[in-house]
Image (spheres, coloured by chain):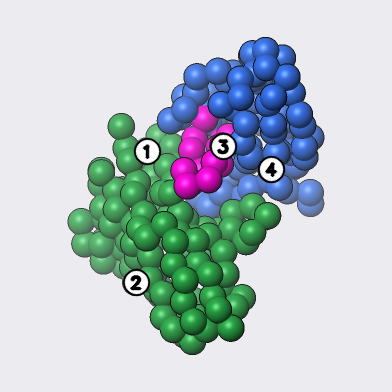
Chain colours: A blue, B green
Amino acid sequence: NAGVTQTPKFQVLKTGQSMTLQCAQDMNHEYMSWYRQDPGMGLRLIHYSVGAGITDQGEVPNGYNVSRSTTEDFPLRLLSAAPSQTSVYFCASSYQGMQPQHFGDGTRLSIL
Amino acid sequence: GQQVMQIPQYQHVQEGEDFTTYCNSSTTLSNIQWYKQRPGGHPVFLIQLVKSGEVKKQKRLTFQFGEAKKNSSLHITATQTTDVGTYFCAGNSGNTGKLIFGQGTTLQVKP
């Protein structure tokens, strides 16, 4: 089992560019989520999904879109990248929302 | 909205000393989870507490969930260099599945 796979691992963008961070899991988990991690801020929830076709906002959703067309995939879209979105992004999944989360290795994103 | 606060932010200890991190929620939690993140790595699940007043142990680690289900703690006895990392608590409030993380406590252990 690959678990939770995030691509790319590193990315540098220019301000105003758009980009999609990919997340896929092969554990048939219903719940998936995206977090950003910044120094001293912990992990902040961006968006989450409790199943295919259902998404909801987390703590810091502005500037990000998500969709969940399949159980396996949960891409995160940056619409118009800003330097404030420079961060490490983690995708996580679990069987259900109340269950332990399995994290991917993260995407390190820099926006110039 | 739901907030989860964690203290201290950093802790430096000598190897062999004990360590405790505390987690407080602004709302009553359905459960609380603890994760460890090694430098450069991703968070890894340690344990989940569900019941009021619950205490669980994993070797040198002791986890507690408060009676009111609004606070929790992680205590490490006799720290080792392998304990280095950032420890996060994360809470679920209600049945939304929305898991909110604390800011984390970064533990440094001096050999």
Distance, label 2 to label 3, CA atoms, is: 30 Å
Q: Earlier in the sequence, mark 1 or mark 2?
A: 2
Question: Which residue is the site of mark 4?
Answer: A106
Q: CA distance from mark 3 to mark 1?
A: 23 Å
**Amino acid on which the number 2 mark rests in the picture:** Val
Residue at (47%, 71%) from the top-left corner? B12
| Structural crowding at the residue carrying mark 3, measured as other residues with C-alpha within 10 Å and reported as few (<14), some (14–19) or many (≥20) | many
The residue where tag 1 is placed is: B95
Q: Is residue A27 visible?
A: no
Q: Position of residue A45 (x, y in %)?
A: 49, 35
Q: Which residue is mark 3?
A: A36
* Mark number displayed over residue B55: 2
Q: Secondary structure at mark 1?
A: loop
- Mark 3 lies on a secondary structure that is strand
**Labelled pair 4, 3 in contact (Cβ < 8 Å):** no
> Residue at coordinates 60% horizontally, 78% vertically from top-left?
B81
Range drawn in magenta: A30-46
Q: Is residue B34 above or below residue B101?
A: below
Label 4: chain letter: A
Which amino acid, by three-letter code, is at mark 1? Asn
Q: Nearer the viewer, mark 3 or mark 1?
A: 3
